[in-house]
């Protein structure tokens, strides 16, 4: 039975990224970008980033018989990511995002095919087929989906984390306590944390979320990160970036850096967050979330210089 440091669960995305925009598009007008780039996104970014950091990572994902699936699958193969836990289905499974970065922010237009009916059962089968120290979800899912997968992780002695992402659950009446009380680490960005907690201050949002989850790690862009644990909230300053090209996927790279410290090195939480800040900050220097994701040697060099 194969063993992994970290198993990640989540979909790939095919990112089409337009850079060098003069402004955001307006209805009835056409604008031109200076460049367009195709890259893998979402869980592809986290899996590739973990792999570059020397983490033995397994990816429980799904690919279809369409062009977008095939393209990102081949990107992952070239990176050397272990894809043995993935399922390929004989139908389209298109996950496509057009990203429009401008002045340090970005807008997205996304299309996603419905998930195949057998995907949940396959995910459970994949987790049963291996052992692992940590399970990471790329985004929130409904309790009836997350709970059975978390139960498998607990039986195997693994810790569990989840990102948030801009999912429909974020804007609906949701049993947040049931979802978040099952995980060890919740890793939203600042806007998501404030939306869930109905707070306008990030530190207050972290304090509010700690009533349900033991460790809250909030990604706050150019402000760095916040770590809430044992009723204390610490601000972790960012790595100073000389150039921000594209912020798409920076949060996924942050997650990889944090988990490298937390799972593999069992480092102090402020060190884990610094790892995350470094990985997220370096990723924005190039187009595509994983394009500039650092190796472990590069991470250590930046860490020691800091």
Image (cartoon, rainbow, N blue to C red):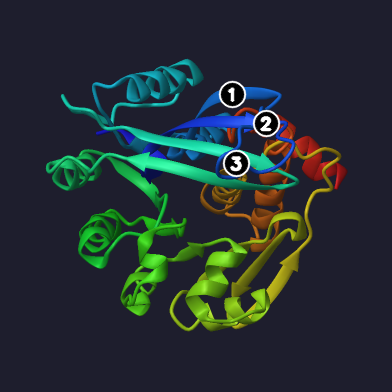
Residue at the spot 61% in from the left edge and 23% down from the top edge: 36
Residue at the spot 63% in from the left edge and 82% down from the top edge: 204
**34 on left or right of 82:** right
Residue position marked by numbered label 1 in the rendering: 37
Judging from the image, what secondary structure is the residue with disc 3 in?
loop
Q: Along the polypeptide, which appears first: circle 1 or circle 3?
A: 1
Residue 283: x %, y % from top left: 67, 37
Q: Nearer the viewer, residue 130 or 253?
A: 253
Judging from the image, what secondary structure is the residue with disc 1 in?
strand
Mark 1 → mark 3, Cα distance in angstroms: 12 Å
Circle number at residue 19: 2
Q: Residues within 10 Å of mark 1 (few under 14, many from 20)?
A: few
Proximity of marks 1 and 2: CB atoms separated by less than 8 Å: yes
Circle number at residue 248: 3
Q: Nearer the viewer, residue 1 or 228?
A: 228
Residue at the spot 18% in from the left edge and 27% down from the top edge: 91
Using the image, determine if residue 106 lies above or below residue 1. Answer: below
Residue 227: x %, y % from top left: 64, 68
Mark 2 → mark 3, Cα distance in angstroms: 11 Å
């Amino acid at each position: 039975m194969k063993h992994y440091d970290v198993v990640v669960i989540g979909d790939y995305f095919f990112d089409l990224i337009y850079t060098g925009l003069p402004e955001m598009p307006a209805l009835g007008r056409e604008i031109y970008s200076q460049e367009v780039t195709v890259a893998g996104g979402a869980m592809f970014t986290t899996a590739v980033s973990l792999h570059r950091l020397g983490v033995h990572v397994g990816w429980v994902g799904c690919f279809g018989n369409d062009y977008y699936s095939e393209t990102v699958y081949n990107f992952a193969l070239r990176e050397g990511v272990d894809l043995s836990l993935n399922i390929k289905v004989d139908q389209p499974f298109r996950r496509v995002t057009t990203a429009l970065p401008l002045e340090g922010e970005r807008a997205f237009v996304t299309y996603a095919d419905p998930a195949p009916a057998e995907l949940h059962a396959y995910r459970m089968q994949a987790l049963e087929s291996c052992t692992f120290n940590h399970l990471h979800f790329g985004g929130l899912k409904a309790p009836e989906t997350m709970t059975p997968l978390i139960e498998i992780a607990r039986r195997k002695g693994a810790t569990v984390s989840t990102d948030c992402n801009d999912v429909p659950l974020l804007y609906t009446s949701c049993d947040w306590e049931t979802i978040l009380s099952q995980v060890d680490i919740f890793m939203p960005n600042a806007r998501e944390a404030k939306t869930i907690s109905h707070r306008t201050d990030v530190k207050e949002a972290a304090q509010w979320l700690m009533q349900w989850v033991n460790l809250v790690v909030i990604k706050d862009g150019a402000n760095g990160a916040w770590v809430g644990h044992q009723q204390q909230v610490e601000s972790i300053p960012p790595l100073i970036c000389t150039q921000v090209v594209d912020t798409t996927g920076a949060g996924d790279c942050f997650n990889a850096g944090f988990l490298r410290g937390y799972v593999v090195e069992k480092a102090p939480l402020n060190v884990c967050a610094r790892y995350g800040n470094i990985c997220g900050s370096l990723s924005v220097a190039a187009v595509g979330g994983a394009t500039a994701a650092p190796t472990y040697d590069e991470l250590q060099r930046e860490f020691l210089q800091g």
